Image (cartoon, helix red, strand yellow):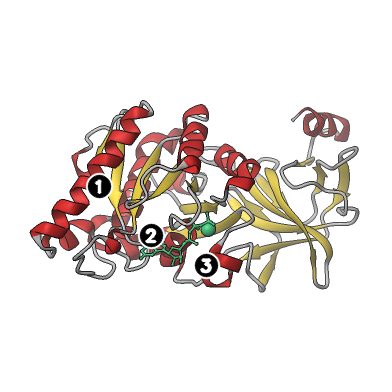
């Protein structure tokens, strides 16, 4: 039904996993970007956000996805750091997620922050898919480009395929040790009870169509009711960073997970002291496929609806705090919203 389309909110997909296992590279592959190359030591140090429209998902997933099967607007990907010192950011990213991708290097298997990520997913009851990444490093692997994994499997030698299978079964065993029943994703009938494992190479693109397909399937089947929200309602989000935005003064990078923010709204933002009550000066939105963390060019817009990453420029934001809530006041009383922010 066409009417439902406009009101479905974009699902938020958190990408979690141990340091260097390939989270940002996987997103680069999806975005067609090179964010990883710009990172000092390829270490992610902040939460990122990237909107991937449905058209891009379908293009990348190719024959695996029929866009007419889906009426979700796309996916909002949240990149998180895997380095051990950023556990607050991982929890924050996990708390925003509707669904998640757990990225695990097939050679390294489960590592401390893999386990930390899995604990977050368990605690927040977030459905997830495992990207068993870096399959191109399996000895004898013959890279096939960004094709569905079955196609790539068929092109491998018996030896390479067996080595990969061994590693995948080790991974499935490690998931079982953490109370997750898992299997190769093409054998999973019910994703509500079983975790699908997708072999991928973020470097060559193999298996990336499959990850996107599983994510769309998971959202469509298990999130659709949750995504049918009133996206016109007063916006709610989380501050990612507080930064100076050239020409606009201090601005906050925000992940909006509910409702709408308009350019004439009053917002309440959590701070190191009392919540800040301020009038929006400008709303700046990154283009589709741009990483908000590294993007330089933003479009000034009149309104942004969930889920989305955006910059909100407003007076008095200097003491705004990363991780704090952002709430649009709209028809409610300021006091009520200030209290809501204080209590979060
Ligand atoms: P943090 O954000 O710091 O936790 O790391 P990350 O998980 O985002 O890893 P990142 O994407 O930065 O990748 C780490 C290194 O692994 C980079 O040098 C990538 O080029 C490389 N890499 C990532 N995915 C693959 C892959 O599938 N195959 C190969 N061969 N290398 C990969
Ligand atoms: Mg990274």
Is label 2 within 8 A of ligand 1 (CB to nearest ligand atom)? no
**Residue 25 seen in the figure:** yes
Where disc 2 sits, the SS reads helix
Question: Mark 2 or 1 closer to N-term?
Answer: 2
Is label 1 within 8 A of ligand 1 (CB to nearest ligand atom)? no
Cα distance in 3D space between marks 2 and 3: 21 Å
Q: Position of residue 37 (x, y in %)?
A: 53, 72
Q: Residue at x 42, y 38 (%)?
A: 224
Q: Residue 327's quadrant in the figure? A: top right
Left or right: 32, with 131 as reference point? right
**Residue 98 seen in the figure:** no
Q: Nearer the viewer, mark 3 or mark 1?
A: 1
Q: With respect to residue 309, does 9 lie above or below? A: above
The front one of 138 and 80 is: 138
**Are dots 3 and 1 in contact, CB under 8 Å?**
no
Q: With respect to residue 144, does 97 lie above or below? A: above
Q: Which residue is mark 1?
A: 167
| Tag count | 3
Where disc 1 sits, the SS reads helix
Q: Quadrant of the N terminus?
A: top left
Q: Which residue is mark 3?
A: 36
Circle 2 Cα neighbour tier, 10 Å, few/some/many (<14 / 14–19 / ≥20): many
Q: Which residue is mark 2?
A: 57
Q: Residue at x 30, y 41 (%)?
A: 171
The front one of 96 and 175 is: 175
């Amino acid at each position: 039904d066409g009417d439902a389309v406009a009101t479905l909110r974009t699902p938020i997909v958190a990408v979690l996993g141990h340091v260097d296992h390939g989270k940002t590279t996987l997103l680069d592959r999806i975005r067609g970007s090179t964010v990883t190359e710009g990172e000092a030591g390829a270490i992610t140090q902040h939460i990122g956000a990237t909107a991937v429209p449905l058209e891009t998902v379908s293009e990348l997933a190719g024959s695996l996805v029929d866009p007419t099967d889906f009426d979700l607007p796309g996916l909002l990907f949240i990149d998180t750091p895997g380095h051990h010192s950023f556990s607050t950011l991982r929890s924050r990213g996990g708390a925003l997620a509707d669904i998640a991708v757990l990225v695990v290097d097939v050679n390294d298997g489960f590592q401390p922050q893999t386990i930390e990520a899995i604990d977050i997913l368990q605690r927040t009851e977030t459905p997830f898919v495992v990207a068993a990444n870096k399959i191109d490093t399996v000895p004898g692997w013959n890279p096939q480009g960004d094709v569905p994994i079955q196609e790539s499997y068929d092109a491998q030698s018996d030896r390479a395929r067996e080595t990969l299978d061994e590693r995948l079964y080790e991974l499935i065993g490690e998931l079982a040790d953490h109370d997750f029943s898992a299997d190769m994703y093409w054998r999973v009938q019910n994703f509500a009870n079983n975790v699908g494992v997708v072999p991928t190479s973020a470097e060559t693109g193999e298996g990336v169509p499959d990850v996107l397909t599983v994510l769309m399937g998971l959202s469509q089947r298990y999130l659709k009711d949750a995504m049918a929200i009133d996206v016109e309602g007063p916006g709610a989000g989380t501050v990612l960073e507080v930064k100076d935005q050239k020409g606009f003064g201090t601005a906050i990078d925000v992940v909006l997970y509910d409702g709408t923010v308009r350019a004439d709204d009053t917002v309440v933002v959590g701070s190191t002291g009392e919540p800040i009550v301020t009038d929006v000066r400008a709303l700046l939105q990154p283009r589709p496929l741009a990483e908000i963390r590294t993007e330089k060019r933003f479009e000034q817009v009149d309104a942004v609806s969930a889920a989305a990453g955006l910059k909100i420029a407003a007076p008095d934001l200097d003491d705004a705090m990363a991780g704090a809530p952002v709430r649009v006041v709209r028809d409610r009383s300021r006091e009520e919203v200030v209290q809501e922010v204080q209590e979060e």
